Image (spheres, rainbow, N blue to C red):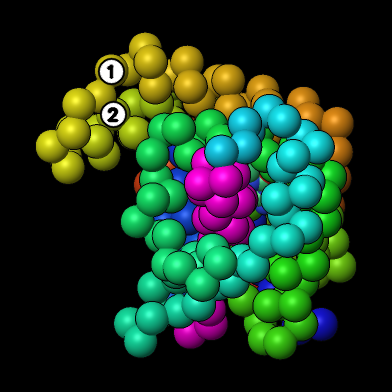
Amino acid sequence: MKQSIGIDGPAGAGKSTIAKRIAAILQIPYLDTGAMYRGVAVAAKRHGVAFTDEAAIAETVASLDLSVRYSDSGEQHIFVDGEDVTGELRTEEISQGASLVSRVPAVRDRMTELQREVAHAQRVVMDGRDICTNVLPDTPYKFFVTASAEERASRRVKQLKESGQPADYETILHDIIRRDRQDSERAYKPLYCGADTKRIDTTDMTIEEAVEAILSEV
Ligand code: DC
C-alpha cells in the first residue's frame, strides 16, 4: 500500500477544497469518497427505493455498477450503471440521501473495497468520513478537518449566494447539524477523530493555512 493521505471531517469543513489543493501540489490523484455515497443515493432514487429502506438499499448496492473515472482535465466523475451522474450529486436531497444510505453496512463495505482498490494502485489524497479510521487505517498521514457548525453554515451561505442561488442560514445550519448527527452517531463505522489522527480546526483558519498545516506533516 502506498502512503496515501486521508482526510476526514464533517460536511462543509472545507475538506474537499483542501484535499484538491494538496493533490495538485503533490501531483497525485484526489478521490472524493462522498461523491461515491452520493452516487449510491442517485441509484436508489432512480430505482424508486427509499433512502431509509435499509434492506432495499443493500439489495440495490449488491447489483450496482458504480465506477469513478477522471476526465482529461483531472475532474472526478461518478458513473452509475454506465451513466455519468456527476451533475446530479450536489442537491440537498442527494446530500441527505447519501448520509442515510451510508448507514447501511453493505453500502459501506462495497465503497470501502472500491476505495482501497484505488489506494492500492497509487498514492492518493482521499477525503470522507471513515478514511483514517476504516479505509486506510495504516497510512501515517491522517487528518481530521473540522470547523464549528455555525462557521460551516456561513461558508455554505456565502458560496450559494456567490453562485446566485437562494440560501437561508437557519435551514442550512439545521441540515448541517442533522447530517453531523447522522454521520457521527450511525452504528456502523461512524465519523470520529481517531487518537492517531491530527485534528485541524479551520474555524479561524484560511484554506491556505490548513493546506500548509497538512503539507508540513507529509
Ligand atoms: O462528503 P460528502 O458531503 O459529499 O458526503 C456525503 C455523505 O456520504 C455524508 O453525509 C456521509 C457519507 N460518507 C460516508 O459515510 N463516508 C465517507 N467516506 C464519505 C461520505
Q: Is mark 2 within 8 Å of ligand 1?
A: no
- Label 2 – label 1 distance at C-alpha: 7 Å
The correct choice, above or below, for 7 with respect to 124 in the image is above
At a point 60% along the width and 51% down the height, the residue shown is: 40
Which picture quadrant has residue 204?
A: top left
Which class describes the residues within 10 Å of circle 1: few (<14), some (14-19), or many (20+)? few
Task: Give the image location of residue 59, x and y in percent.
Answer: 77, 48
Q: In the rendered structure, which segment of residues is drawn in magenta?
A: 27-47
User: Is 38 a magenta residue?
Assistant: yes
User: Is 11 a magenta residue?
Assistant: no
Which picture quadrant has residue 25?
A: bottom left
Q: Amino acid at mark 1?
A: Asp
Which picture quadrant has residue 71?
A: bottom left
Task: Give the image location of residue 119, x and y in percent.
Answer: 71, 77
> Is residue 32 left or right of 65 when viewed as pictured?
left
Task: First in sequence, mark 2 or 1: give its number.
Answer: 2
The correct choice, above or below, for 17 with respect to 5 in the image is above
Instruction: Read off the residue under disc 2.
Output: 157
* Labels 2 & 1 near each other (Cβ < 8 A): yes
Instruction: Read off the residue under disc 1.
Output: 168
Q: Mark 1: which secondary structure?
A: loop
Q: Is residue 174 visible?
A: yes
Q: Residue furthest top?
A: 170
Task: Give the image location of residue 113, x and y in percent.
Answer: 79, 67
The correct choice, above or below, for 140 with respect to 27 in the image is above
Q: Is residue 211 visible?
A: no
